[in-house]
Amino acid sequence: MVTSLFDYPESPQYAENRYIPKKLAEGDYLVTIDNGAWALLSEEEHELLKTHRVSENPDLFKKLESLGIIITQSNQAKVVGDYQARFSHICNGTSLHIAAITSRCNQRCLYCYVNPKPISSKGFDMDKDTAKRVVEFMFQSPSKAITIEFQGGEPLLNFPIIQYIIDYSKKLNKKYKKDIVYTLVTNLTLMQEDILKYLIRNRVGICTSLDGPKEVHDRNRRFLGGHGTHDEVVHWIQDIKTQFAYNVNALPVITKFSLPYAKEIVDEYVNLGFNRIRIKHMIYCGLAKENWNKIGYTPEQYLKFWKGALEYCFKINKSGRFFAEGTSLLITRKFLSRDYQAFTCLGWPCGAALTQTSYDPHGDIRSCDESRSFEEFKIGSVRKDSYRNVYTSPRVLNIVALTSGLNSLCDACVWHPYCNNCIVSSFGMEGNPVPKLPIDYECKIRGGLIEHVLRTLAYSKEKRKILMEWCSSKQGI
Amino acid sequence: MTDSPKNVQYLKDRVLFSINPKIYPLEVVHSAAYALIDKAYVMLDGDPNDEIIAELKPKNKGEIREVVTKFAEELLNYAVYYNQSRMNKGVREMIIGRVFSTNIQASETTQEKDEKCDEIADPLGIAKPWTPPKKKR
């Protein structure tokens, strides 16, 4: 006689893959597996799955077999292929190389995740010798694709080193023949026409921050002297787009000041001719940590804001204008594609010390760009370490193990296949890279974002269509 | 508290929850206690071979019953999780073993994007769903 769930005999026709269930609504159960495949099951279907009686329903059997939620003789190779596609980043080597070529900045933005140095400071710029070693280190990565991203401080304060890194990497690449992409993350306020022409000539992607309309942006992003930077940023965005017909990307970081302005922030992007916005929450480190009492919010407050902005984006699309929200687009892709989505956060393991690395002006190597304000995430130095030494070191392996979530209860979460814990955020909040998940800021935000997208995909036909349109466009995230 | 289960003892501002380790092993108790840290202070005591005592003190006054219910739910939740994990361990290891022992289908030209800079268009055109269409109920 069957006495408990676990006394049901296992089916001889299949084995269950490791799955995590969650009741989404009355009669609807979401089931996810490690590689991101998922199914929404009815009460009856869920009952059959958990009591090992899937064979009684041939349609369900076929569905779960095609997704790899159950394993049979005939789908083993496909399931292995699906896992390989999803976790290809584990074996590809580091492709995103972030060169923080100066720690100096002409701004003091309230939420900066590093601790920028005043513009007159000495000894905080990368010199030529360090830059040379950084480039040589980058080329040791086995990755065929290399993105070199220039960061600061404000990187335009050390423009000659940008030129040097581009020149030297092009020279080295005659031998290595990698696919190189250059990007510059700049506040735009030090942009000049001759610099811009150089960037365009060398196909350097330009990314900037625009936090919304003037009244929001200027509260968050100010010059060292205290006045806002909105006018300069908008001037250059318009100039680059219209005068130079070149692409520039921007994203808003949300602070407490931004919360009442969801619609206005989206409108600012629409009015400037962007066709997407990726809304970004703050990370609890650097100046953001220092200013948290003034600018911080709870995960619930942020999620309410983001959902409002997303709804407004849906409304714009319903009126016939294509305008995508990047975070929901990325998460949708994670739900709908079997492939790895090349975005360094929201993956398990995440990109820290795996697909991305960051170099400070002195050549110290950090696990990721966000970790730059913590010595604890230093994983080596281009002055004394080889790529192989760094990426096989116990410190790096520990970081990757931590972000995999396999040694925490992340592994028991239905959203784990689309998510990860952020060790930098946990370290900033708690002084410990191991997150206390039930109270973890990032966990609550990420879980909330992912659940909202899944519910939208599952329960709103109209919005699902819009999300699918965003996915099928050639837009970046 | 006449309707309390016999393994739950309510005190003034806390509750003692007695757990039979033959029903809920220590790993399950640890996980359930951990899941509660946003709602309660949890202190574990007792003998893992005989009786485990969880002392639960709600962080917010008036939530003592909610904390007890939540703890009971989490015990069951993690009992199922660990049972399920044990049952699927072989399958999971088989998949991962084969993933790493055969050629990785890596997309070598994938350019990683990060939080600040993500201008690169999606070259894969991946909006093709890989889940089969859902049947009308």
Image (tube, coloured by chain):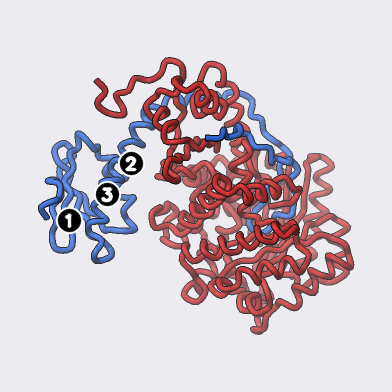
Task: Give the letter of the chain under mark 3.
Answer: B
Which residue is located at x 73 percent, y 66 percent? A270
Crowd rating for badge 1 (residues with CA inside 10 Å; few <14, some 14–19, many 20+): many
Q: Which mark is residue B15?
A: 1
Q: What residue type is labelled 3?
A: Phe
Say if B62 sits above or below A387 in the image.
Answer: below
**Disc 3/disc 2 C-alpha distance (Å):** 10 Å
Which color is chain B depicted in?
blue
Say if A369 sits above or below A108 in the image.
Answer: above
Q: Earlier in the sequence, mark 1 or mark 3?
A: 1
**Residue A277 visible:** yes
Q: Mark 3 points at which residue?
A: B71
> Which quarter of the figure has residue B20?
top left
Q: What residue type is labelled 2?
A: Asn
SS category of the residue bearing label 2: helix
Say if A433 sits above or below A62 in the image.
Answer: below
| Along the viewing direction, whichever of A42 and A116 lies nearer the viewer | A42
> Which quarter of the figure has residue A263?
bottom right
Which chain did the image draw in red?
A: A
Q: Mark 2 points at which residue?
A: B77
- In this picture, residue A178 sits left or right of residue B82: right
Q: Are marks 1 and 2 on the same chain?
A: yes
Residue A376 on image: x %, y %: 49, 56
Q: What residue type is labelled 1?
A: Val
**Disc 1/disc 2 C-alpha distance (Å):** 21 Å
| Along the viewing direction, whichever of A201 and A377 lies nearer the viewer | A201
Is label 1 in contact with label 2 (beta carbons under 8 Å)? no
- In this picture, residue B10 sits left or right of residue A474: left
Residue A108 on image: x %, y %: 62, 76
| Along the viewing direction, whichever of B18 and A403 lies nearer the viewer | B18
